[in-house]
Image: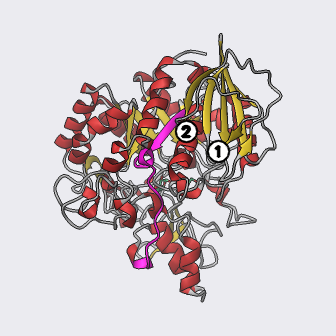
Amino acid sequence: MERTWWKEAVVYQVYWRSFYDSDGDGYGDLRGVIEKLDYIKKLGVSVVWLNPFYESPDRDNGYDISDYYSVMEKAGTMEDFEKLLHEAHKRDLKVIMDLVVNHTSDQHDWFTQSKSSKEHPKRDWYIWRDPVDGKEPNNWRSYFTPSTWEFDEGTGQYYFHSFAVEQPDLNWENKEVREAIYEMMRFWLEKGIDGFRMDVINLLAKVDGFPNAENPDYTDYLANNPGIHEYLKEMNEKVLSHYDVLTVGEIPFVTPEEGLKYVAEDRGELKTLFHFEVADDMPTWDMVRYKEIQEKWHETFYGKGWNSQFLNNHDHTRQVTRYGNDNRYRKESSKLLATMIHTLPGIPYVFQGEEIGMTGVRFDSIEDYNDIAMKNKFREEVEKGRNPVEVFETLLPLSRDNSRTPIQWDETEQAGFTEGEPWIKVNPNYKQINVKRDLSEEDSIFGYYQELIALRKEHPVMIYGDYKDLSKGQQRLYVYTREYGESRWLIILNYSDDHTIFHTDVAIDENRKRLILANYRDVTEDDVLKGTSLRPHEARIYEL
Ligand code: TEU
């Protein structure tokens, strides 16, 4: 297996609008990111992923792009971006951008032209179909609305959208569309960026003829359709292969076998992917299932393609709230989850705020929320006649705004995020949980992340090591080894609010084992491992 910089990367995700506001308009911005680059660097990560900052009416927080060549005013200017890139590179941090090319905004010039008449040369840049029996062309559901089709009175046809009505899908079958996207990608790559996180990149190809779905609520028909691999090969050949970049595809609805097709080293498509067997399919923690997922992906990928590890991002509720214990054991649990993500095979991603154990949020009313997915769903359900309070309650745990509240820098007003009114409310727990406070504590979560990330630079076993689960079927204990050359690591996690006795069939030479890291500070080399009682959310790494 070839060793490369991007396999060894740790990626820090910056949701810039909630990161740091440098000008008091209530939105985080690129200058704010520049001001905090030393903070990011201090953590030890090597790559920064910036969520979209292109020109956008911002219906879906930048994922509805109206101009791929300019920077949204809220984020700053092109000069700000160039400076950010320069400052990041100066600190030896790489920068990857979000690439959103499955759809544009309905305010993009391309769409305005496409919509203007059936004869317009850009008509075919989007997906237009005649009504069928006076209705939508098929029964598909979009991610954010009851139908993928929106009627245009002006031309009497429907256009296709996988997400919101304001996000029409591009027609990738059209060669001019593909060339326009490739040109845009080169524009950013020539500025010196180090890669892309590719938004729902496996949705580009659509099913021929748009047949009705048997179960329209399970929207897998939107993804992995014939033609997708040809597009990605072409994109790689014409653009990506000319640069030394990290490309991570957002790839929902794939098994390991399907996933490998996108990233296998001999296929010339992408470098790595986010699959969603956890984030989309595991609403609450299921340890046994999680282990099965890890094993299956490792067996399919090892030596052939590169995986990614994450438990949260700007779409998915903060990990310590969704999957851990954000109450009594918030610190221990944050560190345990970090230990796991950073010692499993694949690139680890840190979502901003995770490194200080930020939690999900619970606002009082739907008015306090901004997430278009949540708001649309709320409206849809209430229009069906359901009780609004009940609908609101069911949407809370997975609302995307759980992870979109501003970074809590300190205990001052608005958590030190902005001098103005933040675009979304600050989590009321900012006085207890904030960067300043965490950094001042001896057992800081940030400090633990630093140690974990630093280890990766010295120990290739964390990156290239084979993986073996020693605890299949167990709900509380997760015990596994990583092995690379002479080096053999044992990772022990007590995923539980209770004490658990550690046991394993594996031979451990108690005198030779070496403690690498533990999230309870009183653990020493000499502690006998077998039969030890692990405390709630205890995590340990040993070299055997
Ligand atoms: O997300 C795709 C998406 O719909 C996710 O919310 C979903 O939960 C999952 O992760 C994939 O099945 C991307 C962006 O991350 C999101 O913010 C955008 O709203 C969306 O695409 C549309 O561009």
| Mark earlier in primary sequence (1, 2) | 2
Q: Left or right: 540 with respect to 429?
A: right
**Residue 115, position as x, y percentages in the image:** 39, 65
Tag 2: amino acid: Tyr
Viewer can see residue 146:
no
- The residue where tag 1 is placed is 535
Provide residue 275's location: percent of width, then percent of height.
61, 44
Image quadrant of residue 193? top left
On screen, residue 91 versus residue 237, left or right, reads left
- Viewer-side residue, 528 vs 367: 528
Q: Position of residue 468 (x, y in %)?
A: 74, 28
Q: Are marks 1 and 2 in contact (CB under 8 Å)?
A: yes
- Seen at 27% across and 63% down, the residue is 414
Q: Which residues are magenta?
A: 347-367
Viewer-proximal residue among 322 and 149: 322
Which amino acid, mark 1?
A: Arg
Label of residue 520 in the image: 2
In depth, the one of 336 and 194 nearer the eye is 336
Residue 365 among magenta residues: yes
In the displayed structure, 341 sits above or below 363; it is above
